[in-house]
Amino acid sequence: MNVIECNRLTKAYGGAKALNNLSFKLEENKIIGLIGRNGAGKTTLLKIIAGFMKETSGEIQVLAEKPFNNLTVSANVIFIHDQMNLPTALNLKEILQAAARFYENWDDELANRLFDYFSFNSSQHYQGLSKGMKSTFHMILGLSARCSLTLFDEPTTGMDAAVRKDFYRALLKDYIAHPRTIIISSHHLNEIEDLLEDILLIKDGKEYLHLPVADLKEWAIGLQGKTAVVDEWTQNQEVIFTKSIGIDQSYVVVRNHFSEADWQTARTAGVVLTPVTSSDLCVYLTSKTTGGIDDVFN
């Protein structure tokens, strides 16, 4: 079953399109990474999925419903982000109690255990929390709600490294015990890629890549060696990124179409072939130029 189906989804702000004819389908019970640079349209997409915002054109179905102002979607989708407005008149425990009354699958025991583990005080109020503690409290809400569709938009903002690790561990353990669809938008792809099953990479409001993480790790390859030799090897290849190293050395990332025989021939020619991390590849793919920041100085 597809949890989300988008067909030529567009959202325009004035003359600018945050989403531009975006089409994709997401299957249920997967953890999906929503990847893209700032301004790519990630948050806009999540707001439309959650029903907070209406699309300009195109179609979207969430849990087989149109999400905008839809009570069924609201009850089965939770959207966790750093601009959440939580009641200022309630203390933290009272906020959890209010959430328990709204979300049908709410796990009160999990919420209380996480609350105690992260050393929250029952009498604390949300507006008095630090940035990192607010993100941690959001995480408790997102996991404990156990919605059919959980959306995390940069959920670890302000968290220190130890808390981020705890969050990822908690998310994975609870997902294994209670499978549901979880979408995580994050700049820390290197930290979350082991959690993810699929990646949806968007650029300029459009789908750029949508594939399993395992395939992403094999999608590109790096070649390093003398510039003339590397240029010859990449002449008819799809070049994604290029960088000069020293006087006569180059590093070039290309789409991986190399066979095992190609690897052996390349080594003989003095070209070193290396894997490209998922995090680096996504940066290269969403860059405006194939040379990155180095192009500014050329």
Image (cartoon, rainbow, N blue to C red):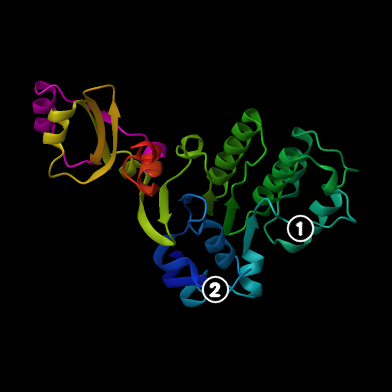
Point out residue 253 in the picture as x, y percentages from the top left corner. Answer: 27, 37
Please report contact status of discs 1 and 2: CB closer than 8 Å, yes or no.
no
> Foreground: 170 or 20?
20
Instruction: Establish if 223 lies above or below 143.
Output: above
Amino acid found under the numbered disc labelled 2: Gly
> Foreground: 266 or 97?
266
Instruction: Establish if 12 lies above or below 254.
Output: below
- For label 2, the SS is loop
Quarter occupied by residue 90: bottom right
Quarter occupied by residue 290: top left
Ranked by sequence position, the earlier of labels 1 and 2 is: 2
Classify mark 1: residues with Cα within 10 Å, few (<14), some (14-19) or many (20+). few
Point out residue 158 in the picture as x, y percentages from the top left corner. Answer: 67, 38
Instruction: Establish if 227 lies above or below 218.
Output: above
At 40% from the left and 38% from the top, the residue drawn is 293
Does residue 245 appear to the left or right of 178 in the view shown?
A: left
Gap in angstroms between the C-alphas marked 1 and 2: 26 Å
Does residue 66 appear to the left or right of 116 in the view shown?
A: left
At 53% from the left and 52% from the top, the residue drawn is 182
Classify mark 2: residues with Cα within 10 Å, few (<14), some (14-19) or many (20+). few
Amino acid found under the numbered disc labelled 1: Asn
Q: Which residue is mark 2?
A: 14
- For label 1, the SS is loop
In the image, which is nearer the foreground, mark 1 or mark 2? Answer: 2
> Foreground: 216 or 197?
216
Quarter occupied by residue 276: top left
Q: Which residue is mark 1?
A: 85
Does residue 255 appear to the left or right of 135 in the view shown?
A: left
At 70% from the left and 41% from the top, the residue drawn is 136
Point out residue 75 in the picture as x, y percentages from the top left corner. Answer: 66, 66
- The magenta segment is 255-281
